[in-house]
Image (cartoon, grey):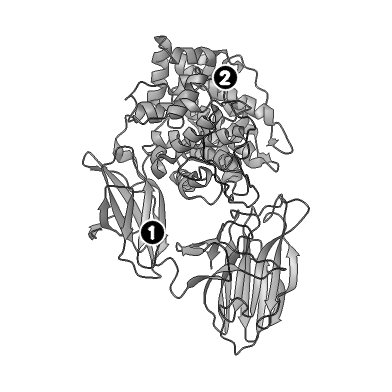
Amino acid sequence: MACILLFYDTAFAQAPAFLHPGLLHSQADLQRMRNGVAQQRSPIYEGYLVFRESPFSHYDYRIKGPLTTVGRNPGIGQSDYDSDANAAYQNALMWAITGDKRYAETAIRIIDAWSNTLKAVTGKDAVLMAGLGPFKMVNAAEIIRHSNAGWPEDAAKRTEKHFRQVIYPVLAEFAPFANGNWDDAALKTVMGIGIFCNDREIFETAVRYYVNGWGNGSLTHYIINDTGQVQETGRDQAHTQLGIGMLAECCEMAWHQGLNLYAYADNRLLKGFEYTAKYNLGYNDIPYTPMPDRTGKYSHMRPSEVARGNLRAVFEQVYNHYVHRMGIEAPFTKAAADKLRPEGPGNPGADHPGYGTLFYSIDPGEGNRHAQNIVTESPAGLVLTATPDASTLSWVGLVDASSYIIKRADKKNGPYLTIGTSTGNFFSDDHVKKGVVYYYTVAGISNGKESAASIPVSLAGGGLPGGWRNRDIGNTGKAGYAQYDGNLLRIEAGGVFTDTLQEAFNYTYRKLLRNEEMIVGVCPQPSSQFTTVGLMIRSGLEPDSPFAALMLYPGKTKEIEVPAWMMQFLQRKAPGINASVIARELLTPPAVTYGRLTGSYWLKLKRSGNTITGSGSYDGIKWQQLASVEWRADQPVLIGVAAASNISNTTTVRVRLH
């Protein structure tokens, strides 16, 4: 690919505004529903009749909350919140469709009550509690705020604050410890909050996790191959439909913001829907490949018969997008949608929006583009990967862009230089220096106009800082790697590193001086809660080399879901002998909750002459020394980050280098 260097006189263009309303329903969608109901146009009108009969679609709905705390496992007000969220959302839509202000008043009353009162979301399943019902609440708020419903802007601002401070923190790290539908519940609500709050960073966080997240719920980890097999296909069909339905909801929100997330990874979402619809329609000729999931906890040998044939209300949206908007065949998704039409509620609880016949029915060729100028949009979901000689950039493209401009800078704030163009959604930059961190943005071109630039993404040339290397030590089963973006070191590691087995792990390292220390902050939520990660000083790269290591390690307990996370100091004093645990200490909240590494934790390994000391910290400021050991000063020494998945798959861990 040709390399062009042009000066770009600003760091990157002003962050684009969001289209409003722009979550599940745009203004054009609401108008289409209004017209369809007024004209009693089939099938929209039949869908409306089903929607209208729901008790959540009545303006005389009696609010069940609010509460100051809601929770799931143990349950605290879950059904009350979900019921009120359903009613807020459906009354907001009834207002938009009928123009009857009484529906708007009911929706406003519910939104205000909860946003003024709710202070905490709790429980072992808090992510699901915060990801399901609140998605409907934020959709309700989006419709009401942008439909002249009479909602004061100061009340809308309070609701923004509520979503940011109460709901978003529960979802911010997603749920990589669980089956993929947990991730996807978090994904859709994080994306919705980003749009409602006009927060491009939050929105971008969701898009990037959708395309490149480390948990089971990112697109290619959930729909695991091109046949369309889903991570939960072997678990049951209810959760499988739940997960793909929530991925589709993310795509519809992105579409309204000008992003063609539906098409990502060669229409992988449609492949998942076709596979799932076919199996649930009674066909048995679907391929199935047993695959280890990202957590290491869930293994299935065949498609599950549990809930098979119980079609959920998730098919109409996807059918209308691929077949009517895009002209792509989807025979099994169509058959499922036909069977459900008119689609009913998204049961149980607040799992799905449902009512797709009313919400999404369009004529062939209709709705290919929302009425919005491309200059208010930007590409998103940028992913950078490094090889020894180049950095490869991919992104989620704009709905109607004909080409893209790629810009690069040595600093996040620029100045940015145009280094090339692409007609696809990828670009390879082979003019990089190893160890230098580069920042990239992408802008789309449509009808001769250039869009705003994307939020920058960064990566060191060659993948690592200058002087650093990465390699697997021992037989890890699957090859690992590490990449550094100027702040975070993201490591993909296989292998086993426990206090009872021979080690095999991924090591990202550099030379260690006689007197120095290394500090890393281990980020929350590795993709497996069996992961071992920490700092290691060793004399060489042979598997049996002497070492001293300060590691976070999930000790075994009677419950596989609740490991005993601890900090361990280990040492092998000479080649060929077993490592010894010198000291260990259990971690407590906020680093660990419900047996999950849900908070950050800092590790410090210091060499001073012949002494190596390990310390830990919950905040990176106050340190607690765990242990010290003696180290022969004449040995060549390396220092770095060691990580192992301790499962048959690899794990992703993220650490901040200090």
Can the viewer see residue 149?
A: no
Q: Nearer the viewer, residue 356 or 236?
A: 236
Q: Earlier in the sequence, mark 1 or mark 2?
A: 2
Q: Is residue 624 above or below residue 649?
A: below
Q: Is residue 579 above or below residue 265?
A: below
**Left or right, residue 414 beside residue 131:** left
Looking at the rendered structure, which numbered label has been put on residue 530? none
Could you say where residue 115 lies in the image, as x and y percent from the top left? Answer: 60, 33
Q: Where on the picture, by quarter, is residue 243?
A: top right
- Residue type indicated by callout 2: Thr
- Residue type indicated by callout 1: Lys
Rendered residue at 63%/58% (across/down): 647
Residue designated by label 2: 106
**Left or right, residue 429 beside residue 167:** left
Residue that lies at the very extreme toward the right in this rendered image: 558
- Check disc 2: other Cα within 10 Å, few if <14, some if 14-19, many if 20+: many
Proximity of marks 1 and 2: CB atoms separated by less than 8 Å? no
Q: Where on the picture, by quarter, is residue 230?
A: top right
- Check disc 1: other Cα within 10 Å, few if <14, some if 14-19, many if 20+: some
Label 1 SS: loop
For the residues labelled 1 and 2, the Cα–Cα distance comes to: 46 Å
Residue designated by label 1: 412
Rendered residue at 69%/54% (across/down): 592
Label 2 SS: helix
